[in-house]
Image (cartoon, rainbow, N blue to C red):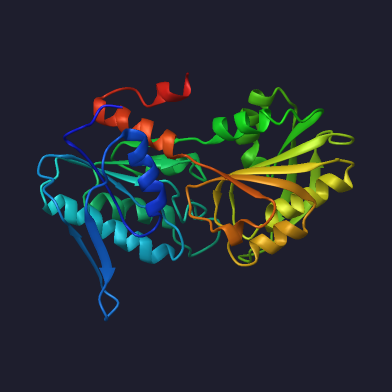
Amino acid sequence: MALFDDLKIFTGNAHPGLAANVCAYLGISQGRLEAFKFSNDNTFVRIQENIRERDVFLIQTMAMPVNENLVELLIMIDAAKRASAGRITAVVPFYAYGRSDKKDQPRVPITARLIANLIEVSGADRVLTVDLHAGQIQGFFNVPLDELTAVDMLARHFKERSIPNLVVAATDVGGGKQARNTARHLDAPIAIVEKMRIGNEDRVEVVNVIGDVEGRNALIVDDEIGTGGTVASAAAALVSQGAKDIYCCATHPVYAGQATEVLERSPIKEVFVTDTLPLSQEARGAKTSVLSVASILGEAIHRIHSGLSVGALFDQ
């Protein structure tokens, strides 16, 4: 791909490997930026080259520690704005706090909206992300937001496995759309695992399986895997209803707490995730395989920079 003289890509400390792969796809060098903490725990960012009137993309996923990486992103945006960047795009492969997208209890915040406000106030002109937990989060922004999806890539990869007699299972009613999109690629029926979340704890209780799964191989789809409890419970419920081999795919491998151990003990045979979040080889365990979204992000950055349609990327 041609070199873009006025395109600059920088990254913080959240996931430098993904940024390097995006730059490799585009055939450009990564911009020079230093970001570190002083002894008083304050974050310092300095862009080490001229970006005046340049088209700047700042890649920073909200990996753990989430708040630390979020603040680093906000400071990076402010640094670029004060360095007179022509346009600033915050590339946030994983948008944290996505589950806090509404008031489902008295006296609680809508944190997903707060994060959107912070990114805008910091000076971002647009946002690029992958598979938001809830589509309405797009409406929290008053700047353009492009939401990419890894569903097609994950479905294509799984289709190459040629698993017979397949059913695609959503982990809840809200995930039905993602399940339908995946099932369309695989030409398979869908099922929905009806669950109930227990208070504010990271535990769920499966109450019903909607759809015919008996004698079928099942693919559980979700936007993210947190503690692993949701997909493990869904897998157990599918097995109890007569499902055979259980597989799982998700875009964001949060893998919080004992997620790796939970997945290893579950009936799930294989798990496919992407690299929107960094995942060490140890955390992957024996079941998890990682696919890269670097080409999707790189192509989207190319299209945004060149004034081409990002939506057409998924029409092909």
Q: Residue at x 55, y 32 (%)?
A: 153
Q: Residue at x 86, y 40 (%)?
A: 244
Q: Relative to residue 67, is residue 166 depicted above or below?
A: above
Q: Relative to residue 216, is residue 95 depicted above or below?
A: below
Q: Which residue is drawn at 24% across and 46% down?
A: 124
- Nearest the viewer among 26 and 238 is 26
Residue that extends furthest to the top in the rendered view of this protein: 316
**Residue 105, percent from left and from top:** 55, 60
- Nearest the viewer among 274 and 184 is 274
- Nearest the viewer among 140 and 254 is 254
**Residue 69, percent from left and from top:** 37, 61
Label tally: 0
Q: In this view, does 203 lie to the left or right of 126?
A: right
Q: Please indicate, yes or no, whether residue 176 appears anywhere in the rendered image.
A: yes
Q: In this view, does 104 lie to the left or right of 148?
A: right
**Residue 160, percent from left and from top:** 67, 28
Quadrant housing the N terminus: top left
Q: Please indicate, yes or no, whether residue 204 appears anywhere in the rendered image.
A: no
Q: In which quarter of the image is residue 70?
A: bottom left
Q: Is residue 96 left or right of residue 299?
A: right
**Residue 188, percent from left and from top:** 73, 26
Q: Is residue 80 left or right of residue 233?
A: left
Q: In which quarter of the image is residue 176?
A: top right
Q: Relative to residue 40, is residue 290 depicted above or below?
A: above
